Amino acid sequence: MSKTKDLSSVFDEIIENGEKMVKSGQDVFSCLDIVIQAIKDMKAIMAPAPAAALPEKPAPAALPDKKEAPAAAAPAEKKYTFTEVRGIMAGLAGKGKKTEARALLQKYGVSRLSDLDEKDYAALVEEAKVIADG
């Protein structure tokens, strides 16, 4: 009977450990669900606004006579924040143009966007828009 009792104990241990493994697996899947949802939320935050949501450009006003118009100053360059530039670059990666985005950063002598000088944001954005549209 001793062998039967020993075998029964082994089976009990196998069952107990198997149940623990199932519980651990369920915990891992639960954690993965949370991580995946967080990544989806981050992607939604990083994605550029859809074209339909962008405000329409106002219609150009009638041009005054050239004699009356003072010499026009060059239009002021738009100032971009780090967050805006990051969103635009993430949009490139989201469109499958991660390699092009990386090459664009390297063109400015940096490997990470956080290393880019703020004065280069507007130029980088213009080139990123060309890549995105191309």
Image (spheres, rainbow, N blue to C red):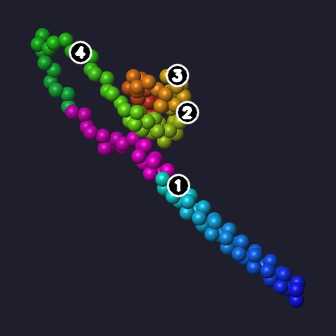
Question: Sequence order check: which comes first, mark 1 or mark 2?
Answer: 1
Q: In whole angstroms, how far apart are the C-alphas of marks 1 and 3?
A: 33 Å
Secondary structure of residue under mark 3: loop
Mark 3 or 2: the one toward you: 3
Query: Label 1 crowding class (10 Å Cα cut-off): few <14, some 14-19, many 20+?
Result: few
In the picture, the disc for residue 35 is 1
Question: Sequence order check: which comes first, mark 3 or mark 2?
Answer: 2
Considering only vertical position in the picture, is 104 above or below 94? above
* Residue 83 image position (x, y, % from top left): 40, 37
Residue at label 2? Answer: 99
Query: Label 3 crowding class (10 Å Cα cut-off): few <14, some 14-19, many 20+?
Result: few
Residue at label 4? Answer: 73
Which quarter of the image is occupied by the C terminus? top left
Query: Label 2 crowding class (10 Å Cα cut-off): few <14, some 14-19, many 20+?
Result: few
Residue at label 3? Answer: 109
Question: Sequence order check: which comes first, mark 1 or mark 3?
Answer: 1
Image-based side of 10 in relation to 89, left or right: right
Mark 1 or 2: the one toward you: 1
Image-based side of 73 in relation to 116, left or right: left
Q: In whole angstroms, how far apart are the C-alphas of marks 4 and 1?
A: 51 Å
Q: In whole angstroms, how far apart are the C-alphas of marks 1 and 2?
A: 25 Å
Image-based side of 48 in relation to 97, left or right: left
Considering only vertical position in the picture, is 109 above or below 87? above
Secondary structure of residue under mark 2: helix
Q: Nearer the viewer, residue 66 or 36?
A: 36
Q: Quadrant of residue 81?
A: top left
Contact (CB < 8 A) between labels 1 and 2? Answer: no
Question: Sequence order check: which comes first, mark 4 or mark 2?
Answer: 4
Q: Residue furthest front?
A: 2
The three-letter code of the residue at mark 1 reads: Val
Secondary structure of residue under mark 1: helix
